[in-house]
Image: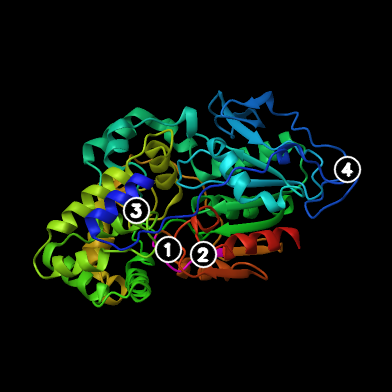
Amino acid sequence: MTSTRGRIAALLGAVAVVAGTTLASPAPGFAATAGPAGAVGAAGASGPARDGGGITGQAPCPDAPEFTCGTLTVPFDHSGATPGTLGLQVAFTGNTTAPRGDLLFLTGGPGQPGVPAIRRMAGKLEPVLRDYRLVMFDQRGTGRDALQCPGLQEDMGSSDLAVPRRQSVADCAAALGPDSRHYSTADTVADIDRLRRALGARRLTLDGVSYGSFVAERYALAHPSRVARLVLDSVVPRQGFDPLDLAALPATARVLRAACQATGCTTDPAADLADTVRRYGNGAQILSALTGYEFVDPDFGGVPEILHEAAAGQPAKLQDFFALVRQEVDAAPAEELSQGLHSAALCADSRFPWGTTDTPVEGRAAALERTRQRLTAEQTWPYDAATATGLGSLLVCLDWPREQVPPAPADHRRLPDVPVLLLGGDRDLSTPYELLYEQAEMAHDPQIVIVPGAAHSVQNRAANPAGRQAVYDFLLR
């Protein structure tokens, strides 16, 4: 991201643009390190090695030969009604007798693969990897077997919120066809339990970031006896993605004002954002750009000045900002984040103003309009109601074909009584910490850590090491 930071800094005139910390590689030789023979850890793993014999074709990973890669074969349809199988790529460290068992790290999106990130995350988690075997996998529809929707990929890239062309949505739905319903989170949860058995693990410790936190929660609800502990980073609550983003809309004022105070800006960016949205009606575009830009600079350097000019009727720099975030931050191929998988999963999992995706398409727009009319300024400020009902992922599912959706867990169900760490950043707009506190109410004795100055994906990106240290302490206690 170095060139990106430089170009955005030049555009914004920011004194400093701060990105996440440099991604470390694991220390030499750690990948083969084993724990003490015969030890018994929190995951219930005992001395005999867990060799992952249910994972076929094991060999050094092509791009990270210090790790082992292989293939997990799962049913395409776990109900058995539709024949066929999928081969999911898996990567893991070599410490098969790690005393605390297997640590499964779950990436986000939905749509991001896991295997390409094994070296990066092993570096981030190195202090715990004498006690745990790190495992990552490409969830169905991601990575080298990513679902391909070229038009939607071009329109949205890695963004949740960028507004797609309706034709791109139609083309994607047609390309995936009725098989798209087999790419839900429920399918991934079933895949994970197959992975657990293939690894020879009685229980798993799950560490999920963003959408990965949602997958971890759903796995824990479906298989409570198979979970040792949970790390939930940049938390999506167990109820799932809110298509109206009613946490992020008001959180933007808090985040931008905190960033403004940290950088010494002299304007009120929240008031200027509200004036800009009122003047131009571009709230969805602003929220999408800000959510992408937090990955580059959690201090949002230069953004208050851009919003102040736009509020005064000078939007040129704002338009340049939109273009640069789209080109330099959001643009991504399907192999990095598949918008086909992203759409299939969110449309299968989510609850919308019209109900679920098992609602006739014909009545959805009217239901959405009724919701827009009921939204209040208190719910949406510094944006407006049209922002909430005009976000990209919602609009994808508005036109997504009707399909049977998997049942959701009952709202009252709590996470199993295992240790839970919830980790968030106070500059996160993708999953504001208000969502973290909502999820914490569903855990028995949660540990909560909010990292000052951190945005989305604390373990991977935060310059402040407090979040990673909290993970180490939690996993090793």
Q: What number is the disc on residue 292?
A: 3
Residue 188 image-quadrant placement? top right
Q: How many angstroms separate mark 1 from mark 3 (CA)?
A: 10 Å
Which comes before the other along the chain, label 3 or label 2?
3
User: In this image, 106 relative to 371: left or right?
Assistant: right
Which amino acid, mark 4?
Gly
Residue holding disc 4 = 47
Q: Which residues are magenta?
A: 423-429
Residue holding disc 2 = 424
Residue holding disc 1 = 428
Characterize the local packing of mark 4: few (<14), some (14-19) or many (20 or more) Cα atoms within 10 angstroms. Answer: some
Instruction: Give the residue displayed 45% in from the left and 41% down from the top.
Output: 111
The reply to whether the magenta stretch includes residue 425 is: yes
Q: How many angstroms separate mark 4 from mark 1 (CA)?
A: 41 Å
User: In this image, 279 relative to 460: left or right?
Assistant: left
Which amino acid, mark 3?
Gly
